[in-house]
Image: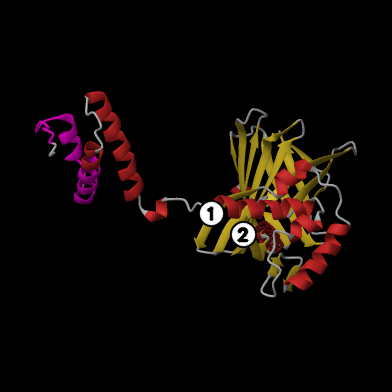
Amino acid sequence: MVQSLLIEPNSEIVRFVKTFGSKEKTFFCSTFYHCFQEHITLKLFNMKKCVAAITIAIITITVPAHAQKNPEEASVKKVIEEETRDYYEGNYSKWADTWAHDSICYVISSSPSAYYADMGWSKISNDYKAYMKNMPPIDEAEYAKNARKYDYNFDIHGGAAVVTFEEGKGVLETRTLEKDNGSWKITGLASVEVPAYKAKDAFNTIKDFEGKWRLIPSSVNTIPTEKGWQPGPCDITIRLTDTGVEMETDRTDTYNGKVYKSPNEKEELIFNSGSNEIEYIDLQKDFSGNIYTQFGKATSDSIGSFTIRVPYTEKPMATQTIETYILTDDGSVVTHSSTYDINGKQTQFISAKFVRL
């Protein structure tokens, strides 16, 4: 028996279908016909459900391939995460189970202070077994800070996968994996200590400022103006030491007509290989001989400049001072110094120019 269905030209379903492209219309009509053949009652309520179900199918089919996640991503990610966890827990047997035991396996790790490369499972397994034998107990806070993985990118084709991500404070990581008897196994690990290279570059930039620099008093600009104060002779000597870079300031200032010779101030910049940061220590002596210290970090975002940030001791997330040193094209150094109150409001800005002696 031939069955038929009359749908009004301006009905809801017709207006809906008109929004589709040609392929979607064909798919919709074909699916709708089969629904009707299966004796689905096309009351308005059921029609809406039918349209909704078919629309979901259309969307699923017509979404671009690159926008759909590969269903293998979760399995690949799990193996990568387990390999790291097993390593830090010193569990060699579980760690080894995440690897393909093959001669093509490799481990490459690079940082400014060390380079490590192993080829072949035999060499990798022997080295890592020795490392894990004396692995100290894992500290969850340190693990969360240094081993957390993020910004994953997957390229999976059949039984092969390449994955990139960042770890900890920005270490660039790559893993290659292959599928063996239905299970993903790691075949390669590459790690580049990007933060360490950046910190090392920043430290080398600071070294470029080595020498003796003299203030040009007329270049000093303060906001707001400090009444009664006149900058006098000021020399900054930047020298390399066994531990890093030392900055010594010898200055004289005039306040309300009286000349004051300040005790020399010494600042130390030390590259910490453990944290890949440049530690800053300021040693100041007052007129009574008392010594005060401040601690902070130094960074460099571009060649020819570096910045020192000092936080409040009682509120480390609040910045107390920021001082930037800029090596200009004419060979001079310009400094910008900003002071903030504990609530983050800027209270003073000073700029000055120094020439090399």
x 82%, y 67%: residue: 127
Looking at the picture, tell me which residue is in the foreground, 262 or 135: 135
Q: What residue range appears in magenta?
A: 4-32
Q: What residue appears at the point 78 percent right and 52 percent down from the top-left corner?
A: 88
Q: Circle 2 sits on which residue?
A: 184
Going by the numbered disc 1, the residue's amino acid type is Glu
Q: In the rendered image, which quarter contains the N terminus?
A: top left
Number of the label disc, if any, that sits on residue 72:
1
Marks 1 and 2 close (CB-CB < 8 Å): yes
Secondary structure state at the residue bearing disc 2: strand
User: Can residue 270 be seen in the rendering of this structure?
Assistant: no
Image location (x, y in percent) of residue 175: 62, 62
| Viewer-nearest residue: 195 or 216 | 195
In the rendered image, is residue 308 in sight? yes
Secondary structure under badge 1?
loop
Would you identify the image quadrant in which residue 37 lies?
top left
